[in-house]
Amino acid sequence: MGSLGGSAGAGDGGKVGLPALDVTLAFPQATPSSLFPPAVSDYYQFDDLLTDEEKALRKKVRGIMEKEIAPIMTEYWEKAEFPFHAIPSLASLGLAGGTIKGYGCPGLSLTASAISIAEVARVDASCSTFILVHSSLAMSTIALCGSEAQKQKYLPSLTQFKTIGCWALTEPDYGSDASSLRTAATKVPGGWHLDGQKRWIGNSTFADVLIILARNADTNQLNGFIVKKGAPGLKATKIENKIGLRMVQNGDIILNKVFVPEEDRLTGINSFQDINKVLAMSRIMVAWQPIGISMGVYDICHRYLKERKQFGAPLAAFQLNQEKLVRMLGNIQAMLLVGWRLCKLYESGKMTPGRSSLGKAWTSKKAREVVSLGRELLGGNGILVDFLVAKAFCDVEPIFSYEGTYDINSLVAGREITGIASFKPAVSAKSRL
């Protein structure tokens, strides 16, 4: 018998048959997300709450993302590769450094930073995570916890994306229980030796500047260190086989007696409470990612239902589909207002860990419902990355878990409203039997 697929085989990577049709030829009845739809999710005119400067930035970010990123995101998401050639486009957004003033940073309001990140996530969640790791974690840590010399040295190149940053807290044995991390910092002449392992660190495989959080071997408290790419004893490898945020290069970091000069210790980090200063703001920013993802899914579904016809009518004409679309829209209006209020609480000095945690937990949970409804509305095309929803469906999942899982963030809020911490299970007394 002849071999399956004729001449196709090992010589061409094992592919069988002809190349796939371009989706616009295979399914001409609906427009793929490479040509992004108009933004139509602001039903309650949230724009009225924004300043003219915030509106202008939002419009700028939306335009760049739709024009420069939408046409390439499906290809790179499928390949699980980061589009390094697009970094100049992402730099042109003007978001790196966010609220940081000086050092070439934009000095935006938190509201402007947040709505802009939502606009990035509306088109591509991976790009929004790339920016948040670089800006809201790495750069913010240097700005909040670094010396003046460190700010002058590192922030100007980071804000222009001439150098890329990452932020390493999570370890293989310590995820939600991050404050118990075991990476060790040992004092040696002229600086420190770092030993340990980090996991799930975004941007780590190519970052020029790595913020490493480690436990001081003498004080047992957490300290922060700036490690440079290529340092002897530093190894970062990509985590493969993810189903979400596939363009983000998450990595395992191994530190084997990595020497950090004293000048690169972040003197403002002496306990986990100091790290919480960074997380307080970054968690608000992360709360806006599910908002943006939901906006993009709604926009795609809104266009798709009017283009796609069955039983002689557009899908938008069916009652069940309208109900799902309206439910998605209602969730987005509520998410926008919660996100906006988080920003205003932070800007007025009224933010608390519980409030930011509740916001992030709630928006990520609501986004799960939005993308699930979008998946239903698109039928078979709802499992194709070409129409955004399948990609968004997967991308929401890691966001639901990082920067505090839904459950942990709920418990942070629960502790704040009850005064009782319930993170650890009660330890039963040993039975005397």
Image (cartoon, rainbow, N blue to C red):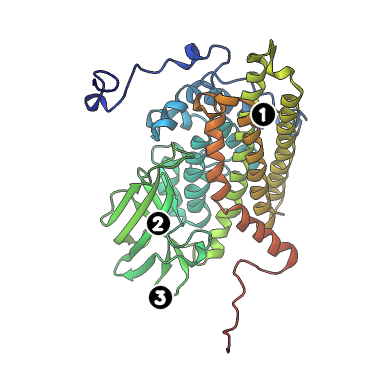
* Most foreground residue, 330 or 82: 330
Q: What residue is rendered at 54% in x and 11% in y?
A: 28
Q: In the displayed image of the protein, which residue is found farthest to the front?
A: 1
What residue appears at the point 56 percent right and 36 percent down from the top-left corner? 393
In the picture, the quarter occupied by the N terminus is top left
**In the rendering, at what x and y percent does residue 294 appear?**
63, 34
Q: Nearer the viewer, residue 86 or 392?
A: 392
Is 351 drawn above or below residue 188 in the view shown?
A: above
Image location of residue 185, percent across then percent down: 37, 67
Helix or strand or loop: what does disc 1 sit on? helix
Q: In the structure shown, which secondary structural element does the residue marked by tag 2 occupy? A: strand
Q: Residue at x 69, y 29 (%)?
A: 52
Type of amino acid under label 3: Asp
On the image, numbered disc 1 is attached to which residue? 55
- Vertical side of 97 occupied by 352: above or below: below
Dot 1 or dot 2: first in sequence order is 1
Q: Earlier in the sequence, mark 1 or mark 3?
A: 1
Task: Tell me whether the residue at label 1 lies in contact with that at label 2, contact meaning CB atoms closer than 8 angstroms.
Answer: no
Relative to residue 181, is residue 430 depicted above or below? Answer: below
Observer-side mark, 2 or 3, equals: 2
Q: Determine which residue is flagged by label 2.
A: 198
- Gap in angstroms between the C-alphas marked 2 and 3: 21 Å
Q: Nearer the viewer, residue 14 or 340?
A: 14
Q: Is residue 232 above or below residue 45?
A: below
First-in-chain label (2 vs 3): 2
Give the quarter of the figure containing the C terminus.
Answer: bottom right
What crowding class fits label 1: few (fewer than 14 Cα within 10 Å), some (14-19), or many (20 or more)? some
Callout 2 crowding tier (Cα within 10 Å): few <14, some 14–19, many ≥20: many
The residue beneath circle 3 is 218
